[in-house]
Every structure is written in structure tokens, then in C-alpha cells.
Image (spheres, grey):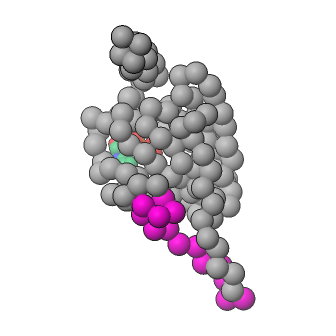
Amino acid sequence: MESVRLIELPQIHDPRGDLTFIEGERNIPFLIRRVYYLYNVPVDAERGGHAHKNLKQVIFALSGSFRIKLNDGRKIEEYWLRDPKIGLFIDRLVWREIDCFSQGAVCMVIASEFYDEEDYFRTYDDFLKAKADLKNDSLS
Ligand code: TYD
């Protein structure tokens, strides 16, 4: 899937503990406008269940692990995140669902835009319609 890829951040090893850093527009491919994180997630919870019109994100498992299921309207893919230095870049217009959270998992999301409910496709049908409209526009 072209709109999704793993990003490996630098890791500074030290007997006192490892250190990883994030720099907007350097190792994250956009200007960072927002950071949020999910925690205290019940192991049977499902998060996500939406796509975005413009928002780009990179998702990290800072602690524990979880699964991210992706659908760009043509292909489906899934990733398991469990390494705090490996993030998953998700471009605009990708439907995502996040589940299988381990006990104590922390999911950190680096985002390219401020929070805006208008940027969400909250139903899969709306998302598919938008993808179809874009395809028709590019063909006409
Ligand atoms: P939502 O994006 O649906 O969560 P997830 O994709 O992780 O399941 O957001 C859940 C609620 O939190 C929703 O009411 C919007 C609110 N919210 C904010 O106010 N600011 C934010 O930055 C985010 C991500 C969500």
C-alpha cells in the first residue's frame, strides 16, 4: 500500500537506557501540529474506525503492542506495532482500525494537523464514496 510505511527512528543505546527522538520534517515527514496518546485501553477495545481527508499520522507503540488494520479502498494490510522506535506512517484517505491492545499499551500518534472533526470520514461508506469521487475526478 503506497500510503502506508514503517519509519525507523534513531536509537541511542546507553547502559542507562535507550533514547529515541522525533524531529518534525526530519524523521517525521511533515510539520508536527499535534501529539496524542491512547492509554488505559481495555484489551478488547477497538479504536479508530475512520479515515481522514487531509490528516497524516505516524503511530508508535511507546509501550506494549497492538494491531493496526488498514484499508485504502483497494488493498488491506495489517501491522503489529511493538517497538517504540518503529512508527507506522499513514497518509490521508486510509481507513484504520486499531485493536488487540496488550495490557498497559500506550499508543502515541504524531499528527500533521490540529484536531478537526470535519476532517474525519466516520463511516466506511463515506470513505469509499470519497475515494470513488477522487478516482472519477482524476479520470475526467
Ligand atoms: P477518535 O479520533 O475517534 O479516537 P480513536 O481514533 O483513537 O478511536 O477520538 C475520540 C474522541 O476524542 C472524539 O470525541 C474526538 C476527541 N479527540 C479530540 O478532542 N482531540 C484529538 O486530538 C483526538 C484525536 C480526539
Q: Is residue 76 above or below residue 129?
A: below
Q: Position of residue 87 (x, y in %)?
A: 59, 55
Q: Does 21 lie within the magenta span? A: yes
The quarter of the picture where residue 67 lies is top right
Residue at screen point 47% across, 64% down = 26
Q: Is residue 89 above or below residue 104?
A: above
- Quarter of the image for the N terminus: give it: top right
Q: Main secondary structure of the magenta part?
A: loop
- Quarter of the image for the C terminus: give it: top left
**27 to the left or right of 32:** right
Q: Is residue 50 above or below residue 33?
A: above
Q: Position of residue 125 (x, y in %)?
A: 44, 17
Farthest residue, direction bottom: 16
Q: Position of residue 27 (x, y in %)?
A: 51, 63
The quarter of the picture where residue 12 lies is bottom right
Residue at screen point 43% across, 21% down = 131
Farthest residue, direction front: 140
The answer to whether residue 91 shows anywhere in this view is yes
Farthest residue, direction right: 15
**17 to the left or right of 118:** right
Q: Quadrant of ligand 1?
A: top left
The quarter of the picture where residue 46 lies is top right
**133 to the left or right of 76:** left
The answer to whether residue 35 shows anywhere in this view is no
- Magenta span of residues: 15-28
Residue at screen point 62% across, 25% down = 75
Residue at screen point 68% across, 57% down = 82
Closer to the camera in the image, 99 or 50:
50
Q: Does 22 lie within the magenta span? A: yes
Closer to the camera in the image, 92 or 78:
92
Closer to the camera in the image, 107 or 83:
83
Q: Position of residue 96 (x, y in %)?
A: 53, 35
